[in-house]
Amino acid sequence: MTKNNNHIRQIEECVAFLQERLPFIPPLVIQLGTGLGDLAGQVQPALILPYNEIPNFPSSTVSSHQGNLIVGHLHGVPVIILQGRFHCYEGYSSKEVAFPIRVLSLLGVKTLILTNAAGGLNPAFAPGSIMIFRDHLNLLGDNPLRGPNVEAWGPRFPDFSVPYDPELTRIALESATVCGLDKVVTGVYACIPGPSLETPAETRWLRGCGADAVGMSSIPEIIVARHAGMEVLGLSVISNVNDPDKMQPIILEEIIAAAEAVKPQLERLIIEIIRRRYAEN
């Protein structure tokens, strides 16, 4: 069996497993990143599945990612929460990183809201800001759509002229105003492989490429979601802003602490976004 056929089989097995167990299929999945997993505590759960109990799901090796799939209602809206994610720096391919999103797209989930913690590159940004993705740079050196295309899953050459849903972006900006959040910005997110953090020269180069923030996650999931025709909204907590001419050490524990500090604002923003998005439909 070829590697691609094995991947298809694993996806199909996982879809069949979840079809039998999920009490309902929500329209929305929210993927929670580094230090941001506590939103799941506000969900009225109908089902909680640890990742290690789901066939063919990767296992998260990062301590700040709990690793649960939760189905339930968040302030009355049916949702799936992915409490934690996977990264290429853990040794996974981008296809494996995006595995949960591919499965959920085939189950009929239509919208992805994705969160992460990122380092700021734009000198106009302040630590503790929330950046709404306007565009992205995939610098992983890998793409989850590499290899034979499954036409039933999406087109061979998906269009990325509008990678992030304009209506969700509008709702996110309006929601920030409603919530009284004054540190919400839009920008371009760059994804690097990691796990080593950026050097001063790399920071300067990324700025020159037009990136406003940099991280090590999210892009494989976004590419697969868009390939599948899902609406996507990306949200980054800007944990720090580094000047390439005066670089300061970047410490993971400080990134997690910064994400934790902004978590209440991000949770309020997400709740208002989904309230407005689904109240309007």
Image (cartoon, helix red, strand yellow):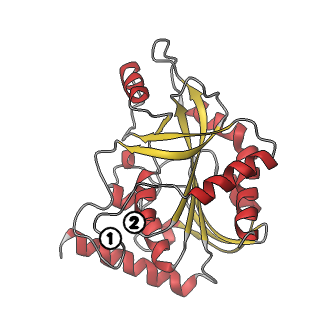
Look at 67% across and 52% down and name the residue there: 172
Q: x, y (%) of residue 233?
A: 57, 55
Q: Is residue 54 visible?
A: no
Disc 2 is placed on an element classified as helix
Q: Residue furthest top?
A: 246
Rendered location of residue 129, percent (x, y): 66, 35
Q: On screen, 50 above or below 200?
A: below
Q: Residues within 10 Å of mark 2 (few under 14, many from 20)?
A: many
Identify the amino acid type marked 2: His
Residue at the spot x=36%, y=20% of the render?
A: 201
Query: With respect to residue 142, does 281 lie above or below?
Result: below
Q: Position of residue 93 (x, y in %)?
A: 32, 55
Q: Which residue is mark 2?
A: 227
Disc nearer the start of the sequence (1/2): 1
The residue nearer to you, when weighing 123 against 270, is 123
**What residue is shown with label 1?**
155
Q: Quadrant of the C terminus?
A: bottom right
Q: Residue at x 75, y 36 (%)?
A: 182
Q: For marks 1 and 2, give the CA distance.
A: 7 Å
Task: Give the residue at x 54% y 46%.
Answer: 133
Q: Evaluate whether residue 95 shows in this view.
A: yes
Image location (x, y in percent) of residue 266 = 70, 47
Q: In this orientation, which residue lies closer to the viewer: 6 or 228?
A: 228
Residue nearer the viewer, 245 or 134: 134
Q: Are marks 1 and 2 in contact (CB under 8 Å)?
A: yes
